[in-house]
Amino acid sequence: MIHPCFLDTMPRTVRSMPPIISRCAISASRTLLASSKTLHPYFCHNSISSTRSYSKMLQGCVVKNAFIKNQTPSIGAWQTLPGQNVSRILARADVDWVMVDCEHGNMDDAAMHEAVPAIASCGVSPLVRIPDMQGWMIKRALDAGAHGVLIPLLRSVEEAKKIVAAAKFPPQGQRGLGSPFAMERFNPIPSMTEYLQQANDSLLTMVQIETREALDSVEEIAAIPGVDVLFIGPFDLGNNIGHPILDGVIKPELEQAMIRILEATNKAGKKCGFFATNGEQAKEYADKGFHMISAALDTTLLQASLGVSLSAARGQQAPKAGGRY
């Protein structure tokens, strides 16, 4: 078997296929998204000629390349279970990125440091959702080699500016340099000098719009230099504006709030992300113009697949897909 560190040099169509649970779920999402009006980065981002003028880091940052070339939606998966094998299963499922969830997932600092290189070794962008917006958490994720960080529960413009400062090297920010690991998460591997010079433009700074306060200031937040992605957390956003998602039903008031976020993002020339609970919903929000969509989560994939298999074994009707959301 080819070692995973060489997988990112191979076309995705000839990479080792993942186990059936992840492959079937992601493939279903890809099929649903294939009819979207914009071309997906899967068909283009491996082109050598299109990245020849890019920096070394940008050549290795799949999701940022997709954004730069406006080849969206960019589809990813969510990791909540620790383990390098889980990381590789998700990363080999034909996605652009895997989000390592250190907020709600079973991912501590050590698990995050194992997941990031495992994902990167498969030629996929490792992204990290940190537990809180503290600067040292941003530094730990980026020093591990994450191609971007997602900060939850943003509430104000000032918080967003502090997040940008923590994620950027001087003069744009206050991030310290010194990690011996970050450079190796890109291919070709940049030197430490190149990493210092290129990181500010190559790495994604993403904030979650999921509070009433952030929604009220979304136009100002979107306009902040250095904020690349406004990512909608629909469950917390619904809770915080008084229209929670119950039994999977998104109320019109929440839908209107999410469209407002998308419009503010587009006006500012940024990208808008959405957390979908299944492939059908991912396709729906791709058609609405969202640029970055999570189409699968490891825990719910496992739950749903087990339900299907066990129901078939017992001669029962299969449960609704999507795990317990």
Image: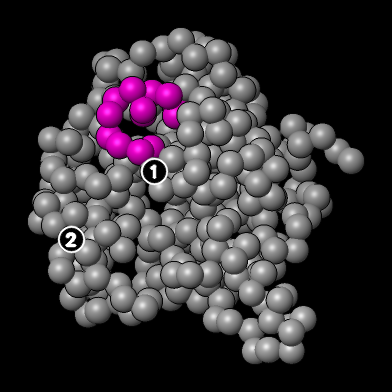
Between 106 and 267, the residue placed more toward the observer is 106
| The quarter of the displayed image where residue 17 is located | bottom right
Give the magenta range: 130-142
Q: Residues within 10 Å of mark 2 (few under 14, many from 20)?
A: some
Q: Which label is found at residue 240?
A: 2
Is 292 on the left or on the right of 32, as rendered?
left
Q: How many marks?
A: 2
Residue 111 vertical placement versus 304 (above, below):
above
Residue 90 appears in the picture as rendered: yes
Which residue is at the far right? Answer: 1
| The quarter of the displayed image where residue 266 is located | bottom left
**Which residue has dot 1 on it?**
103
Per the image, label 2 sits on a secondary structure element best described as helix
Which residue lies at the image location 15% right of the left edge and 69% below the top edge?
242
Between 8 and 251, the residue placed more toward the observer is 251
Per the image, label 1 sits on a secondary structure element best described as loop
Query: Is residue 137 part of the magenta span, yes or no?
Result: yes
Between 118 and 318, the residue placed more toward the observer is 318
Q: Residues within 10 Å of mark 1 (few under 14, many from 20)?
A: some
Residue 300 vertical placement versus 203 (above, below):
below
Relative image position of residue 273 (x, y in whole percent): 37, 56
Name the amino acid type tagged 2.
Answer: Asn
